[in-house]
Image (spheres, rainbow, N blue to C red):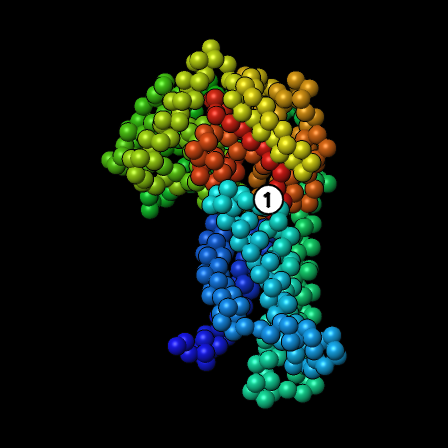
Amino acid sequence: MVNTKLLVSLNRAASWILTLISTVMLSTGYIITRLPVDRSLFNLIHTNLCYLFTVVFIIHFYISVFVIRYPWKRTLENLLRGNAGKWTLIKLTQRVSAWAIVLGAGVLIITGLGWYGLLWRTIPFVQHRVYDLLAGVSIVIHVSMGAKSAFTRIQIGGQSVNILLILFAVILIAVVLYADSYILKGSGNNKEATVIVGETPNGTLPVLEGRIMIGDESYRFNPKEVNTSRPEIFKRGYFSIFDVLIHLGEREVIELEYHFDESMNTHIIDSLQQVQYWWYYAYYSGGWVEQNAFRPDLYPWKDGMNVEFYKVRKGIIDERERIWRMEVNRTRENEGKIIIPLVKLEGKSFNLKFEDVEVTAHNLRLDVFMKDTITAIDVIQTLGDKGLIDYELMWYEEIGTARIVKNYWVESINEDANFGRCGFVYEVGDTLLEGFNGNHIHLPSDIRVINSPEYVYYFWICI
C-alpha cells in the first residue's frame, strides 16, 4: 500500500523544486532573447532545465491529480451555496492556477521541443512566446497560495503575513509582465534600418584579428593575410572559414591536407593535425553553437565570428558528402541551372508552395561575391521577378545583441512585415536535415551561396 504521507511530502518537495526550476528557466529564456550574454551557455542551461522541468512536472501532476484527489464537486457546491471558507478559496485558487500552469507549461514544452525539431514543430513557435506569460503569472499565483498553505500548516499567519504574500505576488507578476513586454518591444532596429537595396554597402571587409578553435587549441590570424581558395565565388579581401585553415596550414601553424572535389563542388579535409573526419561550429556576433551541413569553403568569414573545428564520426562526413553530390548532380541534370524542386513560404496570413523554381542571380552582394553568384535570397527575388510575391529587403548594421551584422534581411513578403521580434527566417538543404538538424543556421540568406538544394523554406516566427 502506498504511504500517503510520503506521497504528500514528495509532492510538496516537487512543487518547490518546480518553483526553483521554472524561475531559472523563465529567466534564462528572457536573458537569451535580450541580453548580451554567451547564448550557447544560457541556451544549454535553458534547454536542460526544460527537460528537468518536464520530468518533475509529470511527477507532480500525477500525484496531484490521480493520488491526492481534489474534491471539485463538493468545493463547487459549497461555493455556490456561499459556504466556502477562506481555506477552501485558497485551495481552489491553488488548483485553478495549477491547471493554468498545465496549459501554459504544456504548450511551452511542446513548442520548445518542436523548435528543436523533436516534434516537427507541432505548434508554431510564436505560442512559446505567448504562453510563457500565462505560465509565469500562474506560477506566481500558485506559489503564493502554496506559501499561504504552508504558513497556515505551521501556524504562522496574521494580517502582516497576508500583506507580505500579496505584495510578493504583485511584485513578481509585475516583473513577469514587464519582462514579457520588454522582450516584445525588441531592439527597435526596424526604425533605424535604411532601405538601400541596389546600393553596395560599405565596411563589410573583415579587418579585425580573427580566432578559430581546432580541437582544444586556439589560433589567431590577420584577415588581411588570408586569400580565398574560391576566387570564382569571393572577391578579393573576402574569404571562407575553410580559407583560414588553408592560411594556417601554409604558415605551418597547423598540419592540413585537403583537395577540391568537383563532384561535390567543395574542398574536402583529408587530414587535420594528422587526424581524419573534422566538422565545425560557426556563428556570427550574437549567435550561438548550432548544427549545420553547409560547405565550409562557402561560409563567409565575418569580423566577430566564432569557429570551432572538432572531430566527428566518419558517417557524419559521409552523409554531408552524399547530399553535396546530389546537389551537384541536380545542377548538371538541369544543364548548369539552379532549379529548386520545392520552395515553401509560410507567413502569418499565407502558405505558398512553388515547384521547380529556376533561380537567377540578382548580384545583391557584389561587395562580397563575384558577379552571378547565387545565394538563398535570390530565391525571394526570383519569385518577385515572376510576379508570384511582393517583398521588401532591409539592410541592418546590427540587430539586438548582434553588433556586427551588415546584411540584407527579408523584411516583408506580401502583406506580412517584420515587427518587434517577429519576422521571416529561412532554411535551405536536403529534407533529411530539416530544421536544426543542419539546414536551419543563422547565416543570413544574402551571403548563403547555394548549389541546387532540395528545398528552400522561408517562414514566420516570433522569438
Residue closer to the observer: 284 or 335: 335
At 69% across and 60% down in the image, what residue appears? 178
At 57% across and 61% down in the image, what residue appears? 102
Depicted 160 relative to depicted 261: above or below:
below
Q: Kindly tell me whether residue 239 is visible in this rendering.
A: no
| Rendered location of residue 240, percent (x, y) | 44, 30
Rendered image quadrant of residue 391: top right
At 68% across and 69% down in the image, what residue appears? 171
Depicted 53 relative to depicted 117: above or below:
below
Q: Secondary structure at mark 1?
A: loop
Residue 306 as seen in the image, left or right of residue 137: left
Residue at the limit of the structure toward the top, as seen here? 335
Residue closer to the observer: 205 or 431: 431
Q: How many marks?
A: 1
Residue closer to the observer: 67 or 22: 67
Q: Label 1, on which residue?
A: 124
| Rendered location of residue 414, percent (x, y) | 70, 30
Residue at the limit of the structure toward the left, as seen here? 274
Q: Kindly tell me whether residue 276 is visible in this rendering.
A: yes
Rendered image quadrant of residue 181: bottom right
Rendered image quadrant of residue 367: top right
| Rendered location of residue 131, percent (x, y) | 62, 55
At 48% across and 43% down in the image, what residue appears? 117
Residue 55 as seen in the image, left or right of residue 105: left
Quadrant (top left/top right/bottom left/bottom right) for the N terminus: bottom left
Q: Neighbour class for label 1 at 10 Å: few (<14), some, many (≥20)? A: some
| Rendered location of residue 34, percent (x, y) | 60, 52
Give the residue type that dot 1 points to.
Pro
